[in-house]
Amino acid sequence: MLALPDHAALAFLPFALPVCFWVAWSDMARMKIPNLAVLALMGLFLLVGPLVLPLPAWGWAWMHFAVVLLAGFVLNLVGALGAGDAKFSAAAAPFVAPADAGIVLYLLATVTLAAFVTHRAARAVPAIRGRVAHWESWHRTRDFPMGMPLAGTLAAYLALAAAGA
């Protein structure tokens, strides 16, 4: 059972899903995660969080943002992660209950593998590739749009928590 209360996840989910879709789409299309999407996710936690989480837990969750942002900054410096990926990860971090961090990492690994295989398979199918031929991610053979699995992980986590998993 996930530690994030189901009522909190249910309150976050309808607002977070469009942002997650926006992030995944934008990263596949332009290999960039818009700063506005990151700010929208942070704004969601800022506005909805205190209504559905105990105030001390909501306040401490901002520390998750700082820690993940710092880790993402270091990973970006060494070339392991894009800046947009680091910022989105940091903005998503407050949504994750501390007790769920390990589960979310496993979920991220699973979603990343599935996203990678799906993206590469779709890229190989001319009918699919032709529908969105302008996507930058089709043409960058060494890069992968991590916004897709990062957003998918947040969406899946919130959906699982909302379902009481």
Image: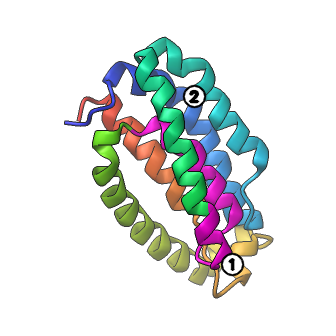
Give the image location of residue 107, x and y in percent: 34, 56
Q: Nearer the viewer, mark 2 or mark 1?
A: 2
Q: Earlier in the sequence, mark 2 or mark 1?
A: 2
**Highlighted range, magenta:** 73-96
Residue that extends furthest to the left in the rendered view of this protein: 1
Give the image location of residue 127, x and y in percent: 64, 74
Q: What colour scheme does the image use?
A: rainbow
Q: CA distance from mark 2 to mark 1?
A: 33 Å
Q: Quadrant of residue 72?
A: bottom right
Residue 89 in sight from this viewpoint? no
- Quadrant location, the C terminus: top left
In this picture, is 159 found above or below 154? above
Helix, strand or loop status at disc 2: helix
Give the image location of residue 160, x and y in percent: 32, 38
Residue 29 in sight from this viewpoint? yes
Helix, strand or loop status at disc 1: helix
Residue that extends furthest to the top in the rendered view of this protein: 51
Give the image location of residue 9, x and y in percent: 41, 28
Q: Residues within 10 Å of mark 2 (few under 14, many from 20)?
A: many
* 114 in the magenta segment: no
- The residue located at (59%, 57%) in the rendering is 70
Residue 37 as seen in the image, left or right of residue 163: right
The residue under label 1 is: 138
Q: Amino acid at mark 2?
A: Phe
Is residue 138 or residue 43 the one in the foreground? 43
Residue 62 as seen in the image, left or right of residue 113: right
- The residue located at (33%, 31%) in the rendering is 4
The residue under label 2 is: 45
Is residue 67 or residue 37 the one in the foreground? 67
Per the picture, the main secondary structure of the magenta-coloured stretch is helix
- The residue located at (72%, 38%) in the rendering is 39
Q: How many marks?
A: 2
